Amino acid sequence: MIPNSIRTVDYHTGGEPFRIVTDVPAIAGGTVAEKRVTALTDPTIDGLRQLLCSEPRGHADMYGGFVTPPDDDGAHFGVLFWHKDGFSTACGHGTIALGAWAIHTGRVPEDPSGTTDVVIDVPSGRVIARVRSRDRKVASVDFVNVASYVLHDQVTIDTSYGTVDATIGFGGAIYAQVAVRQVGLEVSGADLTKLIALAREIKAQLAGSAYAEHPRDDRLSGIYGVIFFEDLGTDDDGNPQQRNVTVFADGEVDRSPCGSGTCARVASLASSGVLDDERQLIHTSIVGSVFTARIVSRGTADGRTAVLPAVTGTAFKTGEHHFTVDPDDPITPGFVLR
């Protein structure tokens, strides 16, 4: 049964919302990955997700997370990420927001050095929000992700715009990455409706194929999002610059440069030699917000050449909510119009 009283704390990271819920009914599962599997079909947990990201309390592009116990004592807490279509395996912008929230609330004590590692268990593994702050005022947060790598390069996909080539990469979730110039569009609000439709086409083409399979854990399989990117050249220091928009789930648009998607881009650019260990990716979103990303280390993961990426951004609190559910309200948990 969905609770009739829910309190949330809301943040945004680069313009992308993140709704934090700490008072969550118990979820079966010994790990966060197992809890995600439970949540997908648990009517109470999934109903709570629907309530918070559906109108009239949310909207089609709402995003958030349920704070859970960690997998073990090595992390401060866990989180189940959610959106209008379900529960995702990873979320960089959400991790950045949770790092800021953990310091703002004192849930994780601020390190006197000014840099605090907030360790979080997510469905794809253990990640770190490395928070730079003083007196609980957060300056920036590094999202240190799981190992990221290219799964498939130069995958040809048939679309209504003709054939396009995509790189399939893993950055905690699986993304198809497409240079938008191939289809004569731009990463802009003017072309956003067309890009949403095209992303749905690409996901449909790849669904159920070998390209959408995770090599180790089938719970991580599936094309989560499509990243459309534009190359903006390099800055004066030789850092590659790109503009992107990530369309994830069923037509949901990331306002930020997308944290886990940026990690997939770092892996792809490292594999192609565009990004080396001395440079950083300057990643701009469709609304003009910016993440920077770099390679922390290189190695192997799941049989692939991999990088450990770190994405830098920050998050800001936008408010607190006390949502209620009237038992006589017929429009519960709500609706979405896209």
Image (tube, grey):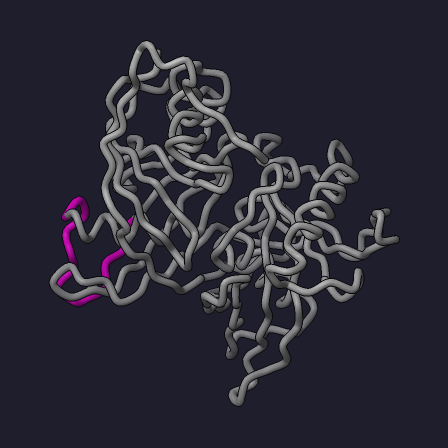
Asked whether, in this view, residue 182 is left or right of residue 289, the answer is right
Q: Residue at x 56, y 33 (%)?
A: 337
Asked whether, in this view, residue 120 is left or right of residue 222, the answer is left
Q: Residue at x 29, y 52 (%)?
A: 99
Image quadrant for the N terminus? top left
Note whether 5 is above or below 59 in the view shown: above
Q: Where is residue 247 shown, x and y percent of the image?
A: 60, 48
Q: Tell me where residue 110 sits by quadrant.
A: bottom left
Magenta span: chief secondary structure? loop
Q: Tell me where residue 214 sits by quadrant.
A: top right
Image quadrant for the C terminus? top right
Note whether 99 is above or below 51 in the view shown: below
Asked whether, in this view, residue 199 is left or right of residue 125, the answer is right
Magenta highlight on residue 239:
no
Q: Residue at x 59, y 44 (%)?
A: 248
Q: Where is residue 296 shown, x and y percent of the image?
A: 46, 65
- What stretch of residues is rendered in magenta? 106-118
Q: Total marks drawn?
A: 0
Q: Where is residue 40 shown, x and y percent of the image?
A: 50, 22
Magenta highlight on residue 108:
yes
Note whether 253 is above or below 139 in the view shown: above
Q: Residue at x 66, y 68 (%)?
A: 230
